[in-house]
Amino acid sequence: MLEDRFGRQFYYLRLSITEACNFRCQYCLPDGYQGPSHEHFLNLEEIRTLISGFAQLGTQKIRITGGEPSLRRDLSSVIDICRHTPGIKKVAMTTHGGRLAQNIASWHAAGLDQINVSIDSLDPRQFAAITGQDKLLHILKGIDMALEGGMKVKVNTVLLKDFSQHRLSRFLDWIRHTPVTLRFIELMQTGDHEAFFKQQHLSGIPLRTQLLEQGWKPLPRELDAGPAQEFSHPDYAGRIGLILPYSKDFCLSCNRLRVAANGNLHLCLFSEQGVSLRPFLQSSDPAELKGFLQEVMASKHATHHLNEGNTGATRHLAMLGG
């Protein structure tokens, strides 16, 4: 089992397979993607060795991220590798959902258990203004198809200062009859977007207080769960999750590591440049990779330093998929 010097154990790997994204979200890539091309990212055999090594060290859940993972033509093969690696019990993916409707059946058939879709507004015009893409209705159709196929669906929305009570009410009306987990995420500062962060950051603490006052009840946290605090309500088919990275003790329950599309291991979303795992991925035998992973865990810090304005090497969230 991978464990750091603070006794935290790591069951969950977030694997980015591309930095590229074709949306232009205001808080991430407002000017579009301008990074390296796909040939610079991990190939299928490197991914196979990587997943095998992590699984042999106790990893049970893989989340495939980007950028936008559906931009890789071999995405179904990546899912299949994760699904058929001994020890991996759950395969999830985060996507903007633009290609969800036409691909969800093949992704599910390849072994995808859960899908997380980013939707920052249920108003089509506001959604287009935030993302640069007029695809909300198409994405909602894809979510319906995923639910009909029996998949677990979570929807991520970033809290911004212009997040109105009307916008919240619209989301709550939607999940009254739609069995998704709606997760509100505090805007996080990144290196390229300091000014936008200062203009738009909104604490999620008042929203948590409001939910509790309205009868939402906290749910116990699963072993391989991410950082969200989840709540349920008897009058709603859906659930609500809150991700509050600026809250006290946010990092105490950390159980996840990140590997970037270029093969760099990041011990925290907001930390160093990462250390390259690629030298250990050229063989199908993950023995050297496992030894290196166990060794490097000693350098994981107790917490991020977001409250101090330290964003580390993270220029934008597409680098590591959040």
Image: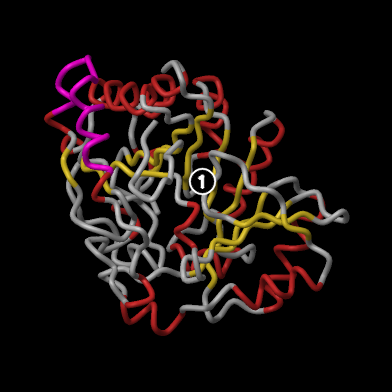
The percent coordinates of residue 35 (x first, y second) are 19, 53
Q: How is the image coloured?
A: secondary structure
- The residue carrying mark 1 is 97
**Does 201 sit above or below residue 292?**
below
The percent coordinates of residue 222 (x first, y second) are 61, 42
Which quadrant does the C terminus fall into? bottom left
Which span of residues is magenta-colored?
A: 280-297
Taking the magenta stretch, the answer to whether it contains residue 289 is yes
The percent coordinates of residue 49 (x first, y second) are 27, 21
The answer to which of 60 and 28 lies nearer the viewer is 60
What is the three-letter code of the residue carrying label 1? Answer: Gly
Q: Residue furthest right?
A: 235
Q: Is residue 243 left or right of residue 256?
A: right
Q: Residue at x 45, y 38 (%)?
A: 12
Which quadrant does the N terminus fall into? top left
Q: Is residue 123 left or right of residue 84?
A: right
Q: Residue at x 71, y 74 (%)?
A: 209
Q: Dominant secondary structure of the magenta stretch?
A: helix
* Mark count: 1
